Structure formats: structure tokens, C-alpha cells
Image (spheres, rainbow, N blue to C red):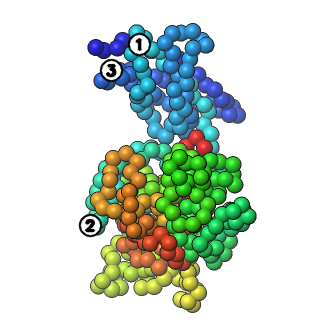
Amino acid sequence: MRRPFAVCLCVGLLVRVGSAQAAAPVLTNITMVGGTPQFGVLSDVGVTNQIQCSTNLNPTNWVVLTNLLVAQSPYWFVDVTAPPASQRFYRVAGSAASPAPSGMALIPAGSFTMGDTLDGESDANPTVTYVSAFYMDVNLVSYSQWQSVYNWATSQGYGFDYAGSGKAADHPVQTVDWYDCVKWCNARSEMEGRTPAYYTDSRLSLPYRSGEVAPYVNWSAGYRLPTEAEWEKAARGGASGQRFPWGNTISWSQANYYGYPLSLTPYGYPYDLATAIDFDPAFSDGDNGDYPYTSPVGYFAPNGYGLYDMAGNLWQWCWDWHGTPYAGGSDPRGSASGSDRVLRGGGWSGKAFVCRSADRGDYDPSSCYYGFGFRSVLPPGQ
């Protein structure tokens, strides 16, 4: 039997910033699906919507169901908590837009085609995947940023396998293994007074601070490594069907990588527009052997989400164990176990092929190399 219900289209604005006020959110398209109420919400993007309900219109009886960071509009809300009742009223209140955390960009929720639609890579078959909204560092973690957190962490009982390296303060940190990147994310969270994401116990009570373990994750808290799906959605910058974040060709004006163009060798890549078979001359100083040939973070133009170095410079550690095929679906987090963790993005020593948005790398998580770096993500509402 269908449950009747009523809806109060009440809206409210909770916060005002300067003289610019966000538009009030609006409830639309209320319906019942399998006995469960759901409705659409039109709202500004980048604000937090508070969904409230009540069984009557008494001003003191409104209950908060959830707080949602709006990453796309309109969106659907499904009230899976609704008990049998003769009526239920809903309203939504929206806060004024708040800026992304310093040094991070909002990656909006949505579906995208994950994988290779152009070059026939066997372990990257195109798969439609939905990813929830999250924040991501606009830059690779720089050496100076790494040192700031690392120095705090080692004074607070954290243990790292490697101290990390960098050619300069504004170059990305490298020579870090997967475990150290995960522990560094936890330390960054704790240093900033946030709840950490990684734990050594299933009850999520013992933060991961030392050793080499496959940690448990609180996915709604703290800094962490991106999942492979999050990384690829972010790398594409809102575009689809392209080889690179900006289009289908690559050159040294767009990324730091090893040139190997078809125009100069029959084994090269037709989409590589480099002018030599060589490292990027802007950073190799005449191939002087002073590796790594990294470039400063933020040196090249950003992608559509405002992210830098999503192709080239350094390979970037991701959360997932490497596995095939892709899981697809909503917010996939990779295989339950494995031997190698995923790396994405290519690097200064990699050819154009590995700098493609769909290319997948993987390596032993306890290994470090001067071609490996990372960046952090942060859940909304932190």
C-alpha cells in the first residue's frame, strides 16, 4: 500500500557572505518510488544544503536528515529513513557558498567514462563510473609541503620508511613509497585538527602512524590518497573522450615527459609533438644526469578543474590495488587485495603513452623511486 505524504516547499538561507547572497534552494518533482519518498532539489553549486523533515508543521519539530555539499544541480534526494506515516513534510535550507580548502579544488559529483576509448589499452576497457564530489590538491605535494608535515609527524610518533626528496622547495616530493604517502595524509589531518582517514583496526580507533599495513579507511574523514576512479575523473577535468586532460596531442608546452614522436622515429607516437627524442630540455639541463628532471609544481597550465600536472612530471600513487576489469558502478575503490598499488599520470621519464588520462601503472607499495609522488583528496564537509 502506498504511503501518502505531504511536502512543505520551505526554503531558507542560513549564511550571507559579503553582499552576494546565494539563491534559495527549491524542492521539485516529489514522488514515491517503491514506497520511499524522493524529490529533486535545484540549488547553487558549491553550497551546503540541509535537508529537514517533520511529521507536522510545528516549528519546533523539524529534524535534520543530512547536510549535503552540492556538486551538481539539480540533484535527487531519497529519504530511505522515512517510516510509515500519514504525512511527512520536507524543506531544504542552503548556506552561502564557501571556498574550497586552501590549495584544493572541488571535483563535482557525476558519471564519466573511465578507461581508454582511443588506443586500445587492454586493461583499461571503457566503463561508465559514478564518483561523488571531493576536493583534490591542485598541485602535487611539493617538497616544502611534505617537509612541513613530515617534521611535525616525526615529532608526534609517526614512523616513515623514507624521508622523501625534492630538487627544490617548489618541486614535487619524490622517493616516497605508498605507505609513507598514506601516513603523511594522516599526519596532515592530525596536524590540522581533522579526523584522520586511515586506521590499523576495523573499529577505526587506532590511527595508522607507522609500519607497513593495508589500513582500514574512514571514507568521510581526513586527507587520503585518491581512488583510481577519483584520480581519472579529476584528470579529465570535465572533458570526455580525450587522450590527455587538454586534448588528443601532447607537447613540451603542456607537460614534462620524455619526447618520442613518430615524426622522429618509426616507433614513436603520432600524438607526441615533442621536437626531439629526449627529456624535456627545460628541466634536464642538457641531460646532465642530475636526476630527477622534475619541474616546479604548477609550472604548466591547469586542466578544466584547475588541477596541475595531471599528465607528466611524476607518477602519482592512488589508493587502489591494481586489478582488472574496472569495477565501475558508484565510487569504486579497487580490488579487495593485491600485490601492487595503482600509479597514474606518467612522469618526467615516461613517454607520451603513459601520460594519457587512461593509462594505468602499478608498483609494489613498499617501493620508492624518484619518479613517484602523490597528491591528497579531502571529502566534502571537512
Residue 245 quadrant: bottom left
Q: Is residue 28 left or right of 175 when viewed as pictured?
A: left
Residue type at mark 3?
Answer: Gly
Three-letter code, disc 1:
Ala
Q: Is residue 31 above or below residue 103?
A: above
Give the numbered dot on residue 196. none
Q: Quadrant of the N terminus?
A: top left
Q: Within 10 Å of the Cα at label 2, are there few (<14), some (14-19), or many (20+) other Cα atoms?
A: few
Give the residue at x 55% y 48%: 204
Comes first in the chain, label 3 or label 2: 3
Residue at x 69%, y 48% (from the top left corner) = 193
Give the Cα distance between marks 1 and 3.
11 Å
**86 on left or right of 225:** left
Q: Position of residue 364 (x, y in %)?
A: 44, 72
Residue to which mark 1 is pinned: 85
Circle 3 sits on which residue? 35
- The picture places residue 5, in percent across and down from the top left corner, at 40, 13
Tell me the amino acid under the disc marked 2.
Answer: Ser
**Looking at the image, which is closer to me, 45 or 187?**
187
